[in-house]
Amino acid sequence: MRVSALLVLVIASILCAQQLEQLVYVSVFNGNEDIYLINEDGTGIKQLTDNPANDWSPEWSPDGSKIAFISERDGNPEIYIMNADGTGLKNLSNSDGNDWDPRWTKNGKIVFLSDRNRYWELFIVNPDGTELKSLLSNWVPEEHMCWSPDGSKIAEESDATGNWEIYVSDSKRKSMKNITNHPADDYDPCWNRAGTKIAFVSDRDGDQEIFIIKPDGTGLKQVTHNHTDDHSPQWRPLPSK
Ligand SMILES: [Ca+2]
Ligand SMILES: [Ca+2]
Ligand SMILES: [Ca+2]
Ligand SMILES: [Ca+2]
């Protein structure tokens, strides 16, 4: 009886652990911006970058196996890529210019902006660094649209009431609901892939922290707890079934 109860407990905890989603975010916990991985319940914090330069703007690959980001570790902004565990670091941009704003295409390439030729240009590169080329087109990567994954809802930040709040509305921006409703600043909403949760940043405890809330404004949870700034949450894509 005791053994089977223990077994049930073990299986339940394994199932529970499997359901936890992960986020990357940026924190200055160690004195400069670095990229961290965290479970949605605040456990399992793993520092993925560790150098004195700033590392920021993490972006998951579509399959959740890699992260593109910006770092100034060679003295100017470059686009880097690493595996989700922080290994396999590679500089993809390699120029003296400013290389900014990495985004993944749906087929797993990286586009970014660069002023290496003294004007802003959009480049595309494979994640292994090959086939770097300028995109001779006016195509610009999508801004971080805060559409829910099924396109039925929008999350957006606004300071219309005098402080920043996150609002969720339908796709025509009607029936807008303030889901944060807190006197501190709340911003940078990011939907999880199932459209059931929104990660956001708030400074309600005196510095920036990552929070999670349901799209209807219930189920608020604080993910990070420290006295430095934590921002730019990005949900890890779930493995495709
Ligand atoms: Ca750093
Ligand atoms: Ca550069
Ligand atoms: Ca607020
Ligand atoms: Ca914090």
Image: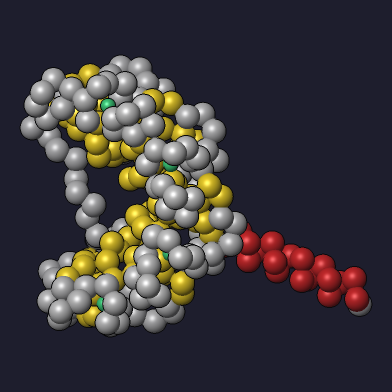
Residue lying at 30% horizontally and 82% vertically, measured from the top left: 182
What x and y, as percent, mark residue 97? 21, 25
Q: Nearer the viewer, residue 196 or 188?
A: 188
Residue 126: x percent and y percent?
35, 24
**For residue 201, which quarter of the picture?**
bottom left
In the image as oriented, which residue stretches furthest toward the top?
131
The picture quadrant where one finds residue 129 is: top left
Residue nearer the viewer, 64 or 89: 89
Residue at 17% x, 67% y is: 171
Render colour scheme: secondary structure
Q: Is residue 7 above or below residue 94?
A: below
Residue 49, given in percent of the width and then of the height, sits at 48, 40
Quadrant (top left, top right, bottom left, bottom right) of the N terminus: bottom right
The image shows residue 45, relative to residue 47, as above or below, that is below
Q: Residue 147 placed where, x, y %?
A: 24, 60
Residue 240 seen by the camera: no
Q: Is residue 6 above or below residue 73?
A: below
At a point 35% along the width and 44% down the height, the residue shown is: 56
Marker count (numbered): 0
Ligand 3 occupies quarter = bottom left
Q: Is residue 7 left or right of residue 13?
A: right
Left or right of residue 186: residue 73: right
Quadrant for residue 178, please give it: bottom left
Q: Which one is in front, 232 or 40? A: 232
Please tell me which residue is depicted at 23% across the width and 52% down the height of the picture.
Answer: 144
Left or right, 41 with reference to 103: right
Residue 16's place in the image compared with 84, above or below, is below
